[in-house]
Amino acid sequence: MPILLRILVSSFIQHNWKATGYLGICISLFVLSVTYSFAQPGPCFTADITRGCVPLTVTVTTCSTDGTQIGYDYGNGNFTNNTSFTYTTPGIYTIRQIGNFESSNGGDTLTRVDYIEVLDTPPPAFVLSTCAGRTVEVGITDTNYDSYLINFGDGSTQVVTPNTTARRTYPDVTLRTITVTGQHITRPTNLACAGSSSSQTITPIQALVKPIINTLTANSFTDVVLDFQTNNHLNYRIYQKTGTNGAYQEIAAVNNPPANPLQQAVNTVDVSTELYTFQVAAVDVCGNQLRSDEISSILLTTTTTNNQNVVSWQINSLPLLQGFTIYRNGQALTAITDINQRTYIDAGVRCPDEYCYQVVANYSNGAQSTSTQSCVRAISTDTPPAIQNLTASVQTGNFALLTWELPGGQQAEEFVIFRSDNGGAFRELDRTTSNTYLDNTGNPITPANTYCYRIQYTNTCGNTSAESILACPVLLTQTTTSSTVQLDWTAYREWPGGVRGYILERVDAQGNVYNSQSMGTSLTTQFEGQVIDTTTQILRFRILALPVNGQIDSAYSNIVELVQPVQVHLPTGFTPDGNGLNDIFTTKGLFISEFTLTIYSRWGEVVFQSDAPENGWDGTYRNEEAPPGKYVYSVRVRDFSGRVYTKEGAVQLIR
């Protein structure tokens, strides 16, 4: 080492040892800064900065005394004559010098491995906390920088190292913006290069704010949630007390919560067997603490008795307790202002419906504690009311169709059908879950087969009703004499309100009504003569009974068929003289489906035949006038019911 260099080093060591006590560091830094400042033959270069913040511009200086055509590779694989290069990506880089050097007899290189360190500058991370007395704490949670410059927003600053804190007490409680800037130490100058900055705002507080619990909700026996108001930059502690006289224990800590309000789950409980009281404490980093008002959990039970549910609950009696609200199936049922009441009887229930209850305790500060949900199914031992609107109506085929409706508010699991045959004792016929029943188990309803019915039901609570009203279908009968046709029917009985009247209906073979006549409340009607209707031979009658109560189904009787007798009329003589009067021997009649007429002479010879009533004999035989006198005829007809009728007689041909 030249003498001048030794003197400089010695002087520098003596000066810095006395000033700082860091001899080794000073020597190292000094030597680093001057080692490559000497000119020398062969490859030789130095950089003005070897460690710094991105983007970093590096300038190299050659110290070779015999080099020509010198260039550099700055770590990207490219050769350039430029002596400055800007790094835009953080990382460790190697620089290689390339050139022709006389002392090396030609080309030579110098490589400085990992020579340049380019440092990233991400925004620094930090948290702010506030203390009573207008003090703010800045906590550096970042480790990306060598140091951090804190600007407290009031003109004061402080440099700290990673993972440390700094506090500042402000003169007032106005909003402050605190900025933290990351700093890297450069080489070889040991100066700080500024990285990115992050800013946050905070308002200092004079005193802690008392936490407010909004709700305590029991989602299940072992899961309750506290919802409470928070303030930024404070920490919170959750305290729990078991029973009525236990001591508070800290069960959770929430530091610098991001949300307001905050929901905190508590899983250290079993609200099916025990009561719990909770408090929330606001805690600052300076050791100050302020607790909220207390709130208690609720222990809820529900039981059932006949036609009512009993809701019971337990709760710790706290100073701010104001009353209760009972909820049923999610809807408010009643409000209770007596804070000592612990039971509510719900008589507005119906068996076997399920009801789910919750109790909400209301506090004077606006807080609410909600119990778990407790569900029960209502019970009843009452005998359900009997069916009062049973109707027995006759359907096609003369079978009884029963219809009915349940009394209001009732639900049936099963109906039991009882039947009395021809006035005998009632016996169980069948069971059904429908409110209609077609009885086709026996013979059709006739005067020889009459039926009456009653019904019982078992409701969804398992209780069996009394027997229903009696239901006997209306029975229609006919009586026919040589001069009259009489229809009679039985009265419909036991309808609530009675019978409003009866209607006599005529129906076709398909059951369609084509004629109806009101009979009032009469139970009989009579027709004169054997032919009632000349348009239809087979008449079908039925009775429609109308109840006074319009909510009850009407009832039909059985259908009675009346086959009117076929009508065949022939004259005793005719005069085929061409005067237009009584010239043709023809047949008049009703209800004729098939027809055959044969006329014989006195010697038994057939003189005329016809298969249509309208085709009569004109008194000729083989195109000649038949002689006057008596002739014998034979008529054979079939009516629309299929019955065959024959008639023989004599007719006088008069000329």
Image (cartoon, rainbow, N blue to C red):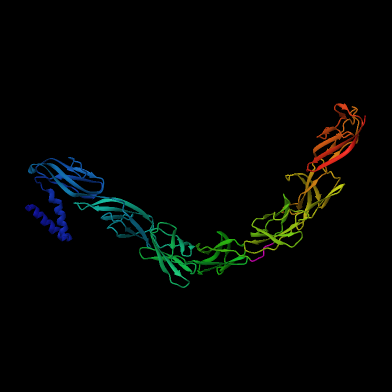
Name the side, left or right, on which 400 lies relative to 275.
right
Front-most of 369 and 338?
Answer: 369
Front-most of 596 and 189?
Answer: 596
The answer to whether residue 522 is seen in the rendering is no
- Asked where in the image residue 386 lies, by quadrant, the reply is bottom right
Q: Position of residue 413 (x, y in %)?
A: 63, 60
* Total numbered labels placed on residues in the image: 0
The answer to whether residue 428 is seen in the rendering is yes
Q: Position of residue 377 (x, y in %)?
A: 58, 63
Q: Report the residue at 65% width, 55% height from top.
A: 434
Name the side, left or right, on which 412 lies relative to 520.
left
Q: Position of residue 302 (x, y in %)?
A: 56, 66
Magenta part mainly helix, strand or loop? loop
594 vs 462: above or below: above
Could you tell me which quadrant the C terminus lies in?
top right
User: Is 576 in the magenta?
Assistant: no
Q: Position of residue 384 (x, y in %)?
A: 67, 63
What residue span does the magenta drawing correspond to? 381-385
Name the side, left or right, on which 25 lies relative to 302.
left
